[in-house]
Image (cartoon, grey):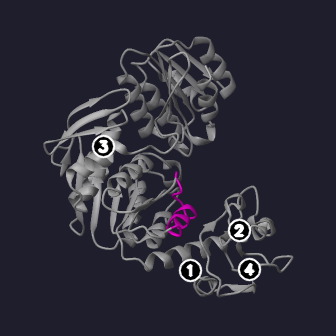
């Protein structure tokens, strides 16, 4: 892309520089900028990217600003809104490619499903995928603008409010839409699971074609499928035996899972039944794109999880730390607790923290998490909201703390060599601090 194209797409003004210069990639952090990159100045909660344009220019960047710079140096483009400019540029770039685009949304499991789908797709295509959880109105455009030689894209779409996924879908223009489930994440913003379904279905707003892949075990998605005849709906499930792809003979271990589907054995390098569901989704996507089953098996067996998603570390004394602390809602808490319960020959410790953005449902859902706690040995909670989990847990050994430091000190006092310690909370609770501290034991 040349500066001239950027000006045309964004309706921007070239403050200074050469419109014929070709750009390499787009960055929002000057620490990642290299010569020929476009530095997009984003106003965040704590800082204003416009303040760093000189630093970016020193590194050879072209700067996209929404404030007139103090000094006219290098190559500077002025636009009305840098976020909208970034989104418009991504939509423009996407429209130039006729390639498969798989978009994934859902209340839980988006990132791990994205990783699995991308691993399967990579058996046939050169795949560009969302890095980490770059799944919002800034992250998704940055992903698409990274597109170079790839011939397929797998993107994750997240949201907090109505309209957000619609925008992302219109930018990415997916050729296949995937919805992993409808749970309770962000129910405080949206008011009901039915509204969450409505928000997730916005993924269809930019869909090219009519293929949608859904988790048929989810009550609202299954109901939606039965009431709709507009789309080609492909289903997967464990409980719902009427699904197109069903997992049978499931065996879940500490570090892996095994199951059969359509007379084929699948090995997943992560434990937990929820990863069986995510793998079924990847199989459905792979089969849609005519990837041979042996290649699909290979893709699943080789996939790697994004950090802080069921990330298992060994301590020096032999205990294991299961860091699933990127985010938390009732559905993901339930899956993580079930995974911990199924671990054999280890004492089980759950370290659980507050779940955010639940609004008026907060107490009810923390209570429901607490009621799940009956087949583990020790419960440690951190935060005011998580005290409701502790109050309703059906075990005797439980501790409540207000800070991560207090929880770390308690764990250090009780940890044993055969322990399995689960860390689960909303990202703002910073449970990675606990994980890093425990790794040294």
Disc 2 and disc 4: Cα gap in Å? 14 Å
Which residue bears the numbered disc 1?
1
- From the viewer's perspective, tell me whether residue 299 is left or right of residue 27: left
- For the image, the number of numbered tags is 4
Disc 2 and disc 1: Cα gap in Å? 18 Å
Q: Is residue 240 visible?
A: yes
Depth order, front residue of 300/333: 300
Tell me if residue 84 comes above or below residue 128 in the rendering.
below
Q: Quadrant for residue 118, please give it.
A: bottom left
* Position in image of residue 214 (x %, y %): 29, 54
Depth order, front residue of 341/311: 311
Pick whichever of labels 2 and 4 is earlier in the sequence: 2
Task: Report if residue 141 lies within the magenta region.
Answer: yes
Q: In percent of the image, x 46 and y 36: which residue is there?
A: 310
* Position in image of residue 172 (x %, y %): 44, 70
Q: In percent of the image, x 63 and y 22: which residue is there?
A: 407
Which residue bears the numbered disc 4?
75
């Amino acid at each position: 892309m040349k500066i001239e194209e950027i000006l045309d797409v964004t309706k921007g003004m070239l403050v200074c520089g050469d419109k014929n210069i070709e750009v390499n990639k787009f960055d929002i952090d000057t620490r990642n900028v290299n010569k020929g990159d476009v530095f997009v100045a984003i106003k965040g909660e704590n800082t204003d990217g416009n303040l760093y344009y000189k630093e970016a220019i020193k590194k050879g960047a072209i700067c996209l600003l929404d404030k007139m710079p103090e000094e006219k140096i290098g190559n500077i483009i002025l636009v009305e809104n840098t976020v909208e400019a970034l989104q418009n540029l991504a939509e423009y770039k996407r429209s130039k490619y006729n390639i498969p685009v798989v978009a994934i949304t859902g209340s839980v499991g988006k990132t791990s499903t994205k990783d699995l789908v991308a691993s399967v797709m990579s058996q046939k295509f050169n795949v560009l995928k969302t890095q980490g959880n770059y799944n919002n109105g800034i992250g998704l455009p940055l992903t698409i603008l990274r597109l170079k030689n790839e011939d397929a894209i797998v993107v994750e779409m997240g949201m907090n409010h109505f309209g957000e996924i619609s925008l992302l879908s219109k930018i990415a223009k997916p050729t296949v839409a995937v919805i992993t489930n409808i749970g309770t994440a962000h129910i405080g913003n949206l008011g009901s699971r039915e509204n969450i379904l409505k928000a997730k279905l916005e993924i269809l707003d930019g869909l090219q074609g009519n293929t949608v892949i859904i988790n048929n075990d989810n009550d609202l998605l299954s109901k939606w499928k039965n009431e709709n005849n507009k789309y080609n709906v492909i289903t997967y499930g464990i409980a719902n035996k009427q699904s197109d792809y069903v997992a049978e003979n499931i065996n879940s271990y500490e570090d892996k899972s095994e199951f059969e589907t359509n007379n084929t054995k699948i090995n997943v390098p992560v434990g937990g039944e929820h990863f069986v569901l995510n793998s079924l989704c990847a199989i459905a996507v792979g089969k849609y794109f005519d990837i041979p089953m042996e290649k699909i098996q290979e893709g699943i067996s080789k996939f790697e999880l994004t950090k802080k998603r069921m990330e298992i570390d060994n301590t020096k004394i032999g205990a294991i730390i299961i860091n699933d602390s990127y985010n938390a809602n009732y559905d993901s808490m339930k899956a993580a607790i079930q995974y911990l319960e199924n671990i054999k020959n280890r004492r089980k410790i759950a370290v659980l923290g507050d779940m955010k953005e639940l609004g008026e449902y907060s107490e009810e859902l923390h209570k429901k998490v607490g009621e799940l706690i009956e087949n583990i040995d020790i419960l440690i909670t951190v935060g005011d909201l998580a005290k409701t989990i502790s109050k309703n847990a059906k075990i005797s050994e439980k501790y409540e703390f207000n800070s991560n430091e207090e929880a770390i000190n308690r764990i250090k006092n009780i940890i044993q060599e055969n322990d399995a310690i689960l860390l689960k909370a909303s990202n703002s609770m910073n449970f990675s601090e606990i994980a890093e501290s425990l790794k040294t034991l």
